[in-house]
Image (spheres, rainbow, N blue to C red):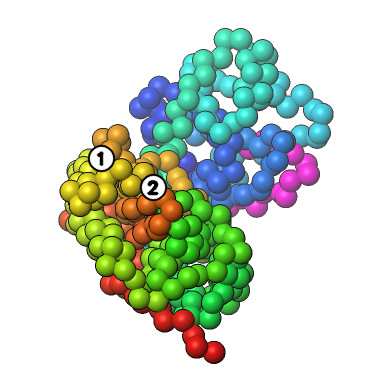
Amino acid sequence: MSTRLEQLIMKMNEQKVSNQLISDPTSIRYFIDYYTEPGERLLLLLVHTNGSAELFVNRLFPRPKLTPALRKSIHIIYYNDGEAILEKIAEKLYPGTSGIDKNWPAHFLLDLLQIEPQLQPLNNSYLIDDLRGIKSLEEQNIMREASRINDQAMARLIDLLPFNYSENELKQQLSNIYASLNQTGFSFDPIIAYGPNGADPHHTTSAHKPDYGDTVVIDIGAMHQNYASDMTRTVFYGHPSDFSLQVYDTVLKANQAAIKAVKPGVPLSEIDLTARKIIEDAGFGKFFTHRTGHFIGQECHEAGDVSQFNHSLCQEGQIFSIEPGIYIPGHLGVRIEDLVLVTANGCEVLNHYPKDPIIIEPSID
């Protein structure tokens, strides 16, 4: 039995949950270090409060290689396409409440309810989300390294800006940079946005090339040992206008103030409002259109966020982004994003690429 499964079982007992059905492939990897993408087929880890568990695996999937400790407590049940596997799952359920993974396709649950009408399903994915939200020392070290490498990638990418690449061309260059740094692909589709394109927080890279004076929003991340990195910097292609510098300075102050507000016991909503107030006081409130941050780990966006509506308290070991922004349609966007690790007395900022305004002069070649 792994420590993570033991922690889950303890929470299940506290909540009087007899069975926990885990279908999310990333969560299964979190608990037993087995990962496969099931597609439309069923993949399920069924955990019971007595410490036993079953892993239901299609014979098409790679065979799990569990540790000796896990092999003692987890029974692997293989099934073939077309086999009535849900009936086997129903046979394994203990009486009482069953926690259902929020990501389990509804048709599996509906079919299981037909087989087992007395099933007491409960969406209690928060038990798993809470565990994944507190990073172990090992996870913290991996994510420090992931962010350190992401800083390097940002530096190399910004060094290419003078050469008038399109957004799409820079995206391809970034892919090459990550490969050279031994990263296993993007952690999300990168955002490279020149000038007015930056006013869309989720801009899709295009063939657009920069104009002199443009802001350049660069939001990038990669996968490192199955953990995600994520950071954003905004730089200037040529000398910016005074207005652009004012917007940048406001976002930077919001980023710095929100980071300073992070410490255990502080409501996440308070961190968001700290950043939001600075932007509102500068007259740009209606242009800050998203939350201040999101949790991150094995996935770039995990459960939990830093928003004005999330009154949960910061806990030591959490890692989330601080990324205020101002987006003025038709003109520009500015976002500055760092990942922070909540520590005993505050937080550790995982990104170290400079945040002072950077002006990139176009190449004359």
Q: Is residue 175 left or right of residue 358?
A: right
Q: Callout 1: 10 Å neighbours few (<14), some, many (20+)?
A: many
Amino acid tagged 2: His
Q: CA distance from mark 1 to mark 2?
A: 12 Å
Q: Is residue 20 above or below residue 90?
A: below
Magenta-drawn stretch contains 55: yes
**Seen from this angle, which residue lies furthest bottom?**
365
Q: Residue at x 55, y 20 (%)?
A: 94
Identify the amino acid type marked 1: Ser
Q: Specify the quadrant of the image occupied by residue 218.
A: bottom left
Magenta range is 53-67
Of the two numbered discs 1 and 2 on the same chain, state the one appearing first in sequence.
1
266 is higher (above) or lower (below) than 169: above
Kindly tell me whether residue 38 is visible in this rendering. Answer: yes
Residue 78 at x, y percent in the picture: 74, 37
Label 2 sits on residue: 294
Q: Main secondary structure of the magenta part?
A: loop
Instruction: State the SS at label 2.
Output: strand
Q: What residue is drawn where x is 27% and y is 54%?
A: 342
Q: Which quadrant: the C terminus?
A: bottom right
Q: Which residue is mark 1?
A: 269
Foreground pick, 298 / 233: 233
Could you say whether the residue bearing mark 1 is in a helix, strand or loop?
Answer: helix
* Residue situated in front as seen by the camera: 223 or 56: 223
Task: Give the numbered dot on residue 199.
Answer: none
